[in-house]
Amino acid sequence: MGNRTSSAAQGNQGSRQPDKRRRIVVACLSVVAQYGVAATTHRKIAAAAGVPLGLTTYYFARLDDLLYAAFAEFASDGSASFADDLRAAASPEDAVTVLVAFILAGQKRGNAESVITHELYTLAAREERFRGITQQWMHANRAALGRLFDEDTVRMLDPLIEGLTIHGLLGVSEPDADLVERAIRRIVRL
């Protein structure tokens, strides 16, 4: 019976471990959004996750590995969400509406997802390992756009989406749904 109790206890701990690992990854993104990659530490992540510091280093000995896991999951979730939104569009006309909403949501001040995205871009610009995450993300987003638009249009839309989001987020221009829609329509020729 001692072995069964021990196995049951280990089974319970084993079932909670993925939850703790997941909490650490989610907390990492929260810390990145609040402090930036440069100020992200195992200690801040552990505090945000509500776990002992040693647990963060148990799962991720190097902070770089934790950042990689967090950004990879973030990018995967982001591209899946973008594809889901575009799947609701039955036509290029419907896609314009979806894209306008997507850009305006990304321009909102305090948008943690946009901040995390740009932290990833900065890291990817410096470190090849992280560039693979951004390239996969861009490829997935372009594939989602490619369901509704030709290749040249997709290659123009993708950076337009990024650029308008950045400008709105940084306050270069106020969010303007009409301008965003006109810009998209010029590219897609609708």
Image (spheres, grey):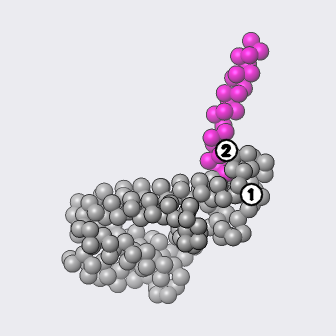
Kind of residue at badge 1: His
Q: Position of residue 150 (x, y in %)?
A: 23, 68
Which residue is found at the position 72% from the left and 51% from the top? 61
Q: Secondary structure at mark 1?
A: helix
Q: Secondary structure at mark 2?
A: helix
Q: CA distance from mark 2 to mark 1?
A: 14 Å
Q: Position of residue 117 (x, y in %)?
A: 53, 68
Q: Is residue 149 above or below residue 166?
A: above
State the mark number for residue 42. Answer: 1
Instruction: Name the residue beneath numbered marker 2.
Output: 20
Magenta highlight range: 1-24
Of the image marks 2 and 1, the number of the one nearer the N terminus: 2
Q: Quadrant of residue 111?
A: bottom right
Is residue 29 covered in magenta?
A: no
- In the rendered structure, the answer to whether residue 98 lies left or right of residue 75 reads left
Q: Magenta span: helix, strand or loop, mainly? A: helix
